[in-house]
Image (cartoon, rainbow, N blue to C red):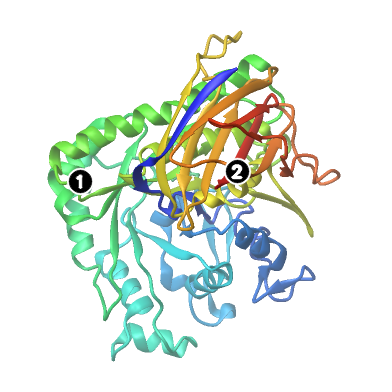
Amino acid sequence: MKKIQVNVNDRKSTINKNIYGHFAEHLGRCIYNGIYVGEDSDIPNTKGMRNDIVEALKHVKLPVLRWPGGCFADEYHWKDGIGPKENRKKMVNTHWGGVVEDNSFGTHEFMELCRQIGCEPYINGNVGSGTVQEMSEWVEYLTFDGVSPMAELRRQNGQQEPWKVKYWGVGNENWGCGGNMRPEFYADLYRQFQTYVRNYGDNKIYKIACGANAQDLNWTEQVMKIAGRHMHALTLHYYTLPTGNWFGSKGSATDFDEKMYYTTLNKTLYMDKLISDHLQIMHRYDPENRVDLIVDEWGSWYDVEPGTNPGFLYQQNTMRDAMIAALNFNIFHKYSDRIVMTNIAQTINVLQAMVLTEGEKMLLTPTYHAYDLYKDHHDATHVYSYADTAPIKNSADSPVPEVSVTASVDANGILTISLVNPSATEERPLQIEIAGLAASKISGKILSGGYKDMNTFDNANNVTVKDFNSAKATAEGVELTMPACSIITLRVEK
Ligand code: AHR
């Protein structure tokens, strides 16, 4: 029996709901043939957005959506994507598969998508191949209410009122696909571009600077030193590759053994150290902790599904991915005083997706269900939790904890405890001691299965959230046994 402690009176920071944010790029079938099928499609849609996907994303309360990239952001010229669709430029999506980008999904469509989902837009502007004027005019087009060329153009295109846009990214991966810049050069460009990202009326922009790739601490150091006082947040990107190999095989999404399973989970846990290391550097240049950290790309990255376009990054999704998601959520909660947003890559049909589609068919992935299990943590107060566990002994010799826990209390005083048992084979009896709340009413939900279990278009509900009714209230708190490879969320009330 493993011991877990939760102390409801030891309150920490608010878990910003934007930690559960997403990312949708013009990449493969994320936008086109993914969420956006066009108004003439036979697939039920509202203004071109698939109704089934929008409903699914609303169900998990998707809070914020990053768009249009990614690498695509630094090649995107927003004026190509406005006005009558028949006049929009057709171009080549050079970075992702060399396919035709017909610009039928642009600014108005993205804002409509956010409206339908009920989420905040996070727009990533173009630094790599764009101009200061272009970025400045995009902000004006979106948010200015007075007399100006861009506000006029927006009205001509059918949108009278300005939109509200808070989150604005100034470039993406400018150390790589966003221009192969040195941090000093980017930091100076950032200072210049952000100057012309204006606040119009009561629309207050929250400026987000491009941060480091994984352990590139020097990027964080230089950008903070040179430009730290001009930003609200700096980003970090970290992907989980089972083999750790960017240039050869990254590993299969579905065909892997137990050793690879543990290796992958061990690699995803590296997120903890990365966040801690980058925060330390940020703190050196920003002792007041004014600048937030945003992990605006993360998740698993495998070889594409056999027979699919290598530039489309389409991969299946198993219980291993649900584990990756939940283990990262627990890390993000731990740093919720400094991490205000994360955006998993990517929402539909790309990398660690929430939803996969095939024609009119769609399925919800195990990752989607992990998001579903954690939604009671949105905007709740993170409270102390501790798991007295050892690393699982495994053939990969890759330490992974026997259990991972996180807890929060919501505005109604209800305690939410989420637990992850990453063991591929062993169930885990747990005794949870709860200080500060006498547990009497407990409800639970569980996601569990074999570590390779997945949903397919023929068996779309193979892995899904179920009720978990076997947690028992005790004098100290709660007792339960977690099945192997499971995630459980308990709601505990007096
Ligand atoms: O998410 C896929 C790609 O990964 C993004 O376009 C880029 O920012 C990152 O390298």
* Dot 2 or dot 1, earlier in sequence: 1
Q: Mark 2 belongs to which amino acid?
A: Ser
Q: Left of 399 or right of it: where is 363?
A: right
Which residue is the extreme one toward the front? 475
* Figure quadrant of the N terminus: top right
Give residue 426's position: percent from left, percent from top: 68, 17
Residue at image location 60% in from the left, 41% down from the top: 489
Q: Is mark 1 within 8 Å of ligand 1?
A: no
Q: Nearer the viewer, residue 218 or 398?
A: 398
Report helix, strand or loop for mark 1. loop
* Residue on which the image places disc 1: 289
Find residue 339 and report its image quarter.
top left
Q: Which residue is mark 2?
A: 440
Answer whether residue 119 is visible to the viewer in this image.
yes
20 shown above or below 302: below
At which x and y percent is residue 198? 24, 72
> Where residue 209 sits in the image (x, y, percent)?
28, 51
Mark 2 vs mark 1, foreground winner is: 2
